[in-house]
Image (cartoon, rainbow, N blue to C red):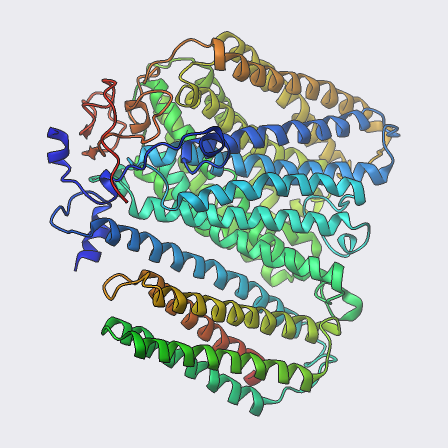
Amino acid sequence: MAVASVTQRGYGGLAEEPDQLYVETRELRIQGFLLFMVSDLVLFSSFIFAYLYLRNSGQGWPAGGPKLDIALAAVNSIVLFGSGATMHFALENWKHGSFSKFANWIVMTIILGAGFLSGQVLEYIHIGARWSSGIFGASFYTLTGMHGLHVFAGIIYLTVLLLQAAQGKYTFTKYTGLTLGTLYWHFVDVIWVVLFSIFYLL
Amino acid sequence: MAAAAIHAGGGLADHIHPEPQGFVRKYVFSIDHKIIGIQYMITAFLFMILGGMLAELIRVQLMKASGGLMTPETYNEVYSVHGSTMVWLVIIPLLTGGFGNLIFPVQIGARDVAFPWLNMLSFWLFPPAGLMLYASFLMGAPTAGWTEYPPMSLQGGAGTSMWAAAIFLIGVSSTMTGINFLVTILKMRAPGMTFTRMPLFVWGQFVTAPLLMIATTALGAALAALFVQRQFGVAFFDPTRGGSPLLWQHMFWFYSHPAVYIMILPAFGMISEILPTFSRKPIFGYKMIAFSSCAIAILGFMVWAHHMFTSGLAPALQLPFMVLTMLIAIPTGVKIFSWVTTLWGGVIHMTTSMMFAIGFLATFTLGGITGVFLAAVPFDLHAHGTYFIVAHLHYVLVGGSLMGILAGLFYWYPKMSGRLMNETLGKWAFWLFFIGFNGTFLPMHWLGMWGQPRRVAMYDPQFQAWNQVASYFSFVMTAALILVLVNALWSMRNGKRSGPNPWNARTLEWQIPSPMPYYNFKHVPSVFAAPYDFAEPLPYRGLEEELDGAPPPVPAAH
């Protein structure tokens, strides 16, 4: 595949490839985006480290915080994971050349993402603690809040992608932007798997 | 068109945007990596003047044991902002954003970095962040040193929050630079530019980029936590509500120890370019120098707690951190020996740049050796709170990074301006700097061993004589730096014209005109070998038309 040879070659050559500039720029963008996600992952990891450090600082857990409601969070998680699946279908349908199916699935993704956020707001109300109340508030609200912001940003991101696709910015062979959006959405999903495990299951 | 046939066209290789017209697009909001590099350098040197003034305030204050120039409170603000400035606004931007941007894309045969717009954004976050840091003086600047340990950093004026926000911005800028550089080096090397043919300065940037990307993000998390703790009372670091001041130290040093290598690895790269050029001899141990940089970067992530031996680290953790820290001396020693062996038997040309590079070898080695002292837990317990630390860190940061930067400035100045810096002034500056630097920081070693505590505005009168020595020599060092600055400004108009390759060097940036044209290369060259074999012809093909003054190829439609 052309992509692999581009990786090894650096650049130059490949004169027979008509859209070589696109292929090479696509490589750069995907790699840059992956590295952005790595650094974003480090951001989460730092706060996860902080949480585990504080949690194990010997005061028992939840120190001054409430017990978390695992049922609500589990339902919410299923909603988010479902949105990952719908996003996958959206991109697959784009690859197969169907704008209408793509649009349906991505709208579904956005709705599920919004559903997840509403669930999180419900949970915040249900818990009733404050950000400034002790190390529980500090770690729980910071981490889930950061994740919530990422979901929120993702919803806006996907909406923009949908509008761009509707305006014809992407073709069925050139859709790097859509690939990146999908990557981002899956990334946010994966972060939630970790957060769910360390807050609700640990 | 012969060359175009060799480098069968299309794609990024022949994709030249036309040069932007108009002052703003060309020099202010430029997306050209060379202009951005120069912007970084000018901004960083301006901040260096500010940080240097703070340093002199410190030295004037310490001329008398009873202080007298400033209140202790002001003194705390001054040294905190001095440290923050020099680390985040001077050394890191100069080495990565400055020299990195200017030189390494050309050295790999690229026309620009992978994301030029992101590069511009990186730069334009930097001056506002610096101004924010200095604005903190208006609202009670940070007082807990550049490391801002809680609980002290939780008290005091809004300046500390401002500090956190400013450094966070710098961090975002660094992260974007790191991503940009890494993608550029991974994807945009000229045909034939394999990893083992890359110039060692590129290796320096290649190893630094992931550190910028990963470590700086971790720092961002720590700063964000400090900010919300101060502004919204979120209990990360407050021990009265379950938080832990030690957590800050872990989060901070997990960044800041790799940051130490961000501040030195590119300088290693510069030295590895300058020494062979002026010894007229291939670099000794090319692969060892490249791989030892990787080893340093990896080990750098595993040693952060050696800054915390006196903060109450579990004894079971002290030993591994001590051993890992000492291990770093091995790759560093490999480099030092390789450089010395490069000089051995070479035809040494004592240009100013070379003098700074050899000065680097001497002072950095001293700083590195005291680093091994401090890695040993028992010695660290004794010396940690004293001037010995100040001596050590200035030997590696001033004697190492800054010397490297000055060597690089004299070396690459022609590539920015088309003119050479004045050698006579430069040699004066070198000797003044070398004497001034050692006179300032060498006495701090024994001042520290005798027990003078660092970061205190007054001290025991028995230390006064040596403190005065340090202060007087610091004026000499400042004079030397002013001389370099004057030299750089004067040479911009009046320096000798350099031509494309005044040093007869072999890396790619010297094979194109000085100053470098907007598009770098008319035709992206092919590379056949590493650039250090001075006996051989140049290992590049496709550069034939670079220097004949013909117009660049027609810009590709986009």
Which image quarter: residue A50? Answer: bottom right
Give the answer, above or below, for where B89 lies relative to B115.
Answer: above
How many dots with numbers? 0
Residue at screen point 76% across, 52% down? B153
- Which one is in front, A202 or B459? A202
Q: In this orientation, does residue A56 appear?
A: no
Q: Residue furthest front?
A: A167
Q: Quadrant of the C terminus of chain B?
A: top left
Residue at screen point 69% across, 58% down? B226
Q: Position of residue B541 (x, y in %)?
A: 17, 29
Position of B67 compared to B365: left or right? right
Q: In this orientation, does residue A54 appear?
A: yes
Position of B379 compared to A111: left or right? right
Q: Position of residue A38 (x, y in %)?
A: 44, 60
Q: Quadrant of the N terminus of chain B?
A: top left
Q: Residue furthest bottom?
A: A71
- Which one is in front, B357 or B93? B93
Which image quarter: residue B445? Answer: top right
Q: Position of residue B47 (x, y in %)?
A: 63, 32
Q: Position of residue B303 (x, y in %)?
A: 54, 52
Which image quarter: residue B320? Answer: bottom right
Residue at screen point 64% across, 20% down? B477
- Which one is in front, A7 or B154? A7
